[in-house]
Image (cartoon, rainbow, N blue to C red):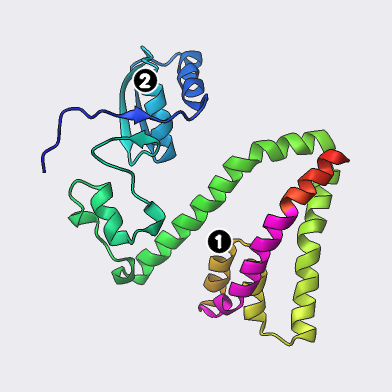
Amino acid sequence: MTIPDTYDVAVIGYGPTGATAANLLGQLGLEDVTVAGNSVGGWIAAEMAILNSPRIRRVILIDPVGMQVPEHPPAEFFSLRMDQVFPLSFHNPAPFAIDPATLPPAAQQTLSDFGLGGFIAAVGLANGHAAWIAIQAHGLLLVGMGLVVTLFPLIVATLFAYHVLRMNPVIICGALAGAMTVDAAVTGCCEIAKSQTPVLGVAVPYAVGNVVLTVLGPIIVACTFVG
């Protein structure tokens, strides 16, 4: 494989994020900075690079999106199997071609815990600031309403499923996680049950929950702004 010294690369406009990050370097007084970005972070890092900031020494792009390289058209990542992803991600994919199913149970559990922790951290970082602003604006009333709106349907659904439908409690937990469309909750149910039984209750509530969220989301937002 021949690797050229340079590529004719076009960076798709991402918005002001790259400029904002570059300006932050000045506000912090940082010099001779190495910027490394992965995925969307690589997109932002590339935008920082083309700004020619004197504070940035070099930029490292790791599987960046937002790049247009004529010699390497973008792949539809979500349609690929893992064995098809590795050659596109690494110059020498052999050391990384690991089948998770062949890993020891302890290693599989570690990867699962790491993914679950990363998911929770990402949700917190993405929504924490907005949630804090909303709490400051509306006080504890907003927190109380959130608890009621979240817990009341789950409590009613649990009682109905257990006492009326006579469902297995383990499957009920999976159904509730599916209805909330939270994959991490499904994983947590399986870990606590020490089996995959909760997954049996996920499919239908998950599908219905996604449809309801899609339909009601715009309606609720529209009603809020009209009000």
Residue in the image at 48% along x and 20% along y: 19
Instruction: Please check the rendered image and state whether residue 198 is part of the magenta-colored stretch, yes or no.
Output: yes
Q: Nearer the viewer, residue 22 or 211?
A: 211
Label 1 sits on a secondary structure element that is helix
Check contact, mark 1 vs mark 2: CB within 8 A: no
Label 2 sits on a secondary structure element that is helix
* Mark 2 lies on residue: 50
Residue in the image at 49% along x and 50% along y: 118
Question: Quadrant of the rendered structure where residue 210 is?
Answer: bottom right
Question: Which quadrant is home to the N terminus?
Answer: top left
User: Secondary structure of the magenta portion, mostly?
Assistant: helix
Residue in the image at 81% along x and 64% along y: 152
* Circle on res. 184: 1
Residue 159 higher or lower than 61, as above or below: below
User: Residue 158 location in percent, x, y?
Assistant: 75, 75
Point out the residue furthest to the front here.
70
Residue kind at label 1, given as amino acid type: Ala
Residue 40 higher or lower than 24, as above or below: below
User: Residue 193 location in percent, x, y?
Assistant: 56, 77
Query: Of circles 1 and 2, which is in front?
Result: 2
Image side of residue 105 versus residue 181, left or right: left
Question: Quadrant of the rendered structure where residue 72 is?
Answer: top left
Cα separation, mark 1 vs mark 2, equals 38 Å
Residue 164 higher or lower than 44, as above or below: below
Residue kind at label 2, given as amino acid type: Ile
Point out the residue furthest to the bottom here.
166
Earlier sequence position, callout 1 versus callout 2: 2
Question: Which quadrant is home to the C terminus?
Answer: top right
Instruction: Please check the rendered image and state whether residue 141 is part of the magenta-colored stretch, yes or no.
Output: no
| Magenta stretch bounds | 196-216
Residue 141 higher or lower than 137, as above or below: below
User: Residue 124 location in percent, x, y?
Assistant: 60, 45
